[in-house]
Image (cartoon, rainbow, N blue to C red):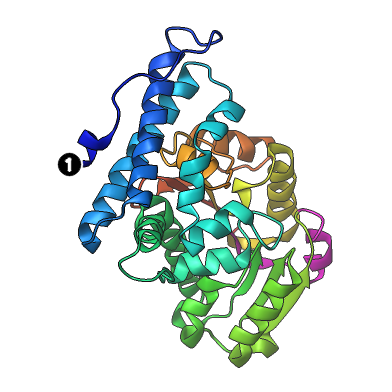
Amino acid sequence: MELVQSIDPSPWPRAAAWDDDTTPALDRLRTACRRMEHVAARPFTGEARIFHRVIAIIHEICDALVEAEAAGVAPAELRAIVAGAREIHSQSPFIKRLQEWPRGYPGDFETIERLWQAENQAPPGTLGHAFESYALSAAIAQQHRNKVAFQAASIREAMAGGQACRLLSIGCGSCPDLRSVLDQTTATSAFVLCDSDPDALAGSRAALASIARQCEFVHGMVPRVLRRVRGSAPFDLVVAGGLFDYLSDRFIVRTLSELWHDMLAPGGRILFTNIGRGNPFRVWLEYLADWRLIERSEDDLIALCRDAQISVPPILVRDATGLSIVATLRRPSA
């Protein structure tokens, strides 16, 4: 029997506070959540079929969430409606981590490491495996891997021809970009790696053991941590991958200003990224997981650089998914 035939099509009771704009969206949202609950209660076999059914219902829920938000429904009410669907999502170990953030802050290095490695840890053939496969293969996950690859290519380019590079990485996490080019690092290069989580730095130290003598590991929050690394400047390359997704405009302006005016070598580059405004995965991240990112447009990033009194405009490109903006600021050589 087709799944849609097992769902009671009768409308949900209308609450007095709902108007004609919000009722259809909430009806659709409740129906989509019931479909997900039905799948969880009566799972069927076939890994491909489970995967596609899960994705179809996730997209139904997200579409209804977007419509309900546009109609003015409060986020708290929407979270209450999707609570059951959110709990079903937690059958994926990775998504459960996004809901709970066991290290106490979003975007922690262990989560980002799992996102980068993209290894499904749920039992094959289960609903949790389908959810985890979606979370790790969706464009919102791929954009992160694309950013890491772009950062790694920039580090490799800075050392091309055997030249020395002084790298500063802020919010370095587990350093997947530097680890990607570990066998191509030059012996005269130096790497200053900053993060607010001491365990991230400890993990990076272990992973980068072969070049540990060239690395300086600095614990601290941005932008205050910049004071502690001024003595290692000037830098040929500064990388801030994903960090600005969590920082206010004020902190970004302060960070960019200090880096550009006080810490960047002639001909040096600052590379930073930001999730683009209009990210279609936002409602899934916020309501079914608990991952809030500060979205910005290209115009927003240009304005931040202008406010930081940077004399050249950033070079802006989108990653292959179109979800993430990669910005490069290059200081003139002379």
Within 10 Å of disc 1 (Cα), the crowding (few <14, some 14-19, many 20+) is: few
Identity of the residue drawn at 40% across and 69% down = 120
Q: Is residue 229 magenta?
A: yes
Q: Position of residue 152 (x, y in %)?
A: 47, 70
Q: Which residues are magenta?
A: 223-240
Give above or below for 106 relative to 314: below
Left or right relative to 35: residue 297: right
Left or right relative to 262: residue 129: left
Disc 1 marks a residue whose amino acid type is Glu
The residue pinned by badge 1 equals: 2
Q: Position of residue 171 (x, y in %)?
A: 66, 62
Give above or below for 281 relative to 221: above
Return the residue nearer the eye: 32 or 8: 8
Q: Residue furthest left?
A: 1
Q: Position of residue 71 (x, y in %)?
A: 47, 16
Q: Position of residue 139 (x, y in %)?
A: 36, 51
Identity of the residue drawn at 34% across and 64% down = 126
Q: Quadrant of the N terminus?
A: top left
Residue 326 in view? no
Return the residue nearer the eye: 260 or 137: 137
